[in-house]
Image: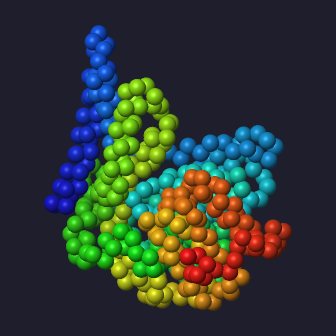
Amino acid sequence: MRYMATYDLMETIRNTNQWLGASTLAMASYPAMAMFPNPALQWVSAWGEVTERAFSRMVVKPDWNIPPIVGDNGTDCIVYEEIEIKGEFGDLLHFRVQGRTEKRRTVLLVAPMSGHYATLLRSTVISLLPDCDLYITDWHNARDIPVSAGKFDIEDYTLHLVDYMRHLGPDTHVIAVCQPAPLTLAATAYLAEEDPSAQPRSLTLIGGPIDPNAAPTEVTDFGHSVTMGQLEELMIQQVGFKYAGVGRKVYPGLLQLSSFISMNAETHQKAFIDQIQAVAQGQAHEHDKHNKFYDEYLAVMDMPAEFYLSTVDRIFKKGEIAANEFTVAGKKVDMGKITTVAVKTVEGSKDDISAPGQCIAALDLCTGLPDSKKANHLEDGAGHYGIFAGKSWRDNIRPLVLDFIDANEAPSKGKAKAAPKTEKAANKNNAA
């Protein structure tokens, strides 16, 4: 029960801070307070507003809020989110564009299960929708999944991806962002041996820890500095009575959020002080840069304990993917079996989560794949977030990914073409 009590204690602290912020804002907004204008009072009101907003966002899944896109006839087309495959631990979500008739590239975007919702890729989705028929893995918050649903570890995650790829068919192009990159590679290799006709056309891996030891970071150092027993003792808690998943063991999102913030504490502190000042001066608004970023950044989800622990143990500590020793349901998955799926890796030169060298290791694992079907891109000056969102993604990476997809499209669709000149057969040397 002490783990459940700890979970409830974190929620109590969060709830209390949300209440303090709301109460402070309400008190400072009394009409009587306006009788005595005071800059300090404006600052207190601003503190309450920013604090209430920050702590309330931590337990709410953000909406997708995908804006309309310009259709073939120049009119705005509404984008709908439809559940293609519903599941206990996650759904396969389809973004359907109203009135679209012309066939687009079929793309499966694999979102991370690493503490944030799939909506973290909202800007990525918006950038791809005009050119793609887009699907995404929408993982659920473990706190809301009843214990009766069973376990969910990295093997279950991999098999979910296998099912999604089978459902979408062989003309699909898969893009995996960050954490799911190694498991997406494994799912593709699994299909290569078990159901070759269901393999996707191409696989793009963006900033993923295929070989975490290829370029150590704080994340990999932490994984090696603690034992699995210590990790389970320190990080795993049981969901409290407030949620449907009561009793389920999880790695709490609030605990993960504290780790995220501690990595760049001074930056976050300055951002909130600046925002309080902006609110006090009337210069902030609902959709300003601060709110757009932190509304998403602070919205965290719990991960199933078995998924978190098996990720650390098998991906980071034992390096099963990097050593090509990964197994699913007792069967070894051989990356060398991938012989027809074109594979591209994308890395950022300033990525401090999955440093350059970690993701491109996938190309060396694909020993059965000819060099003509391998490609890599190293984005100069881009950090982890920048390689799938922001200017680096929009201006440089996205066009290259779409070119790579087109170069490996089904010939019957009439889109196949030679690989762009910017794409070269890849190895670790030309990505360094």
Eyeballing the image, is 179 above or below 99? below
Q: Which colour scheme is used?
A: rainbow
- Give whichever of 390, 343 is nearer the camera: 390
Task: Name the residue furthest top.
Answer: 35
Residue 411 at x, y percent in the picture: 81, 74
Residue 310 seen by the camera: no
Give the quarter of the figure containing the N terminus: bottom left
Taking the view exactly as shown, the residue that stands out farthest to the left is: 2
The location of residue 184, given as percent across then percent down, is 53, 73
The residue depicted at 42 percent of the width and 80 percent of the height is: 213
Q: Is residue 321 above or below residue 112?
A: below
Residue drawn at 32 percent across, 52 percent down: 265
Residue 261 in picture, x, y percent from top left: 34, 54
Location of residue 317 with respect to 66 vertically, above or below = below
Dividing the picture into quarters, in which one does residue 136 lie? Answer: bottom right
Of the pair 392 and 164, the residue shown nearer to us: 392
In the displayed structure image, the side of residue 7 where residue 185 appears, left or right: right
Residue located 22% across and 76% down the image: 229
Q: In which quarter of the image is residue 26?
A: top left
Viewed as shown, does residue 71 lie left or right of 17? Answer: right
Front position in the image: 208 or 252: 208
Residue located 81% across and 72% down the image: 417
User: In the visual, does 23 lie left or right of 346?
Assistant: left
Answer yes or no: is residue 381 visible: yes
How far across and how far down the image is residue 234, in percent? 22, 66
